[in-house]
Amino acid sequence: MQRTETAHSYKINASEEILVKIRSEQTKEAYRIIEHRGAANAAPPLHLHRNEDEIFEILEGQIRFCLDGDIIEASPGTTVAVPRNMPHTWADVGGIPSRMIVTFVPGGFDRFFQAMESIPHTDPRAPILGEEHGCIYLGPPMEV
């Protein structure tokens, strides 16, 4: 069993912070676990992951997911699985900050968060960095 170390934090834009819980290299790239902290009304653009499945566990806040056009309301205790290549987005709709544990399978998506540190999703570099890491931007964020 490996010991976990102090979590590293990435502020990827003004409304989202990523705390690394388990790094990909700790699992030989099998998976990666982060804690996502979002400000009220945080919402990433519609996107998909070419290489990873994504599993969200809602800890705090109210999250509205759009999964390939289907809307799912998620409150604390809800788990939402998003298979790779599925267009998806989400928005914090509860009016308060949210917290989610997010697992990426396999690992490796760490490098996207490192590349995106301090870059808002609206920055013209964001979709280019996303593409380099298998994250394809498809459209604007969900309206809150």
Image: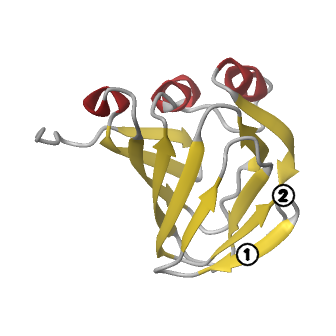
Question: Residue at left 67%, top 37%?
Answer: 120
- Mark 1: amino acid: Ile
Name the spot of residue 14 as percent of width and height, x first.
59, 47
Q: Which residue is mark 2?
A: 68
Q: Circles 2 and 1: CB distance less than 8 Å?
A: no
Badge 2, how many Cα within 10 Å: few under 14, some, many 20+? some
Badge 1, how many Cα within 10 Å: few under 14, some, many 20+? few
Quarter of the figure with the C terminus: bottom right
Please, what secondary structure does the residue beneath circle 2 have? loop
* 77 in relation to 37, above or below: below
Alpha carbons under labels 2 and 1: distance apart: 11 Å
Name the spot of residue 108 as percent of width and height, x first.
47, 27
- Mark 2: amino acid: Asp
Name the image quarter holding residue 66.
bottom right
> Which mark, residue 142?
none
Name the spot of residue 127 as percent of width and height, x first.
77, 28
Question: Residue at left 56%, top 28%?
Answer: 112
Q: Which residue is mark 1?
A: 72
Q: Is residue 18 left or right of residue 93?
A: left
Q: Is residue 54 left or right of residue 141?
A: left
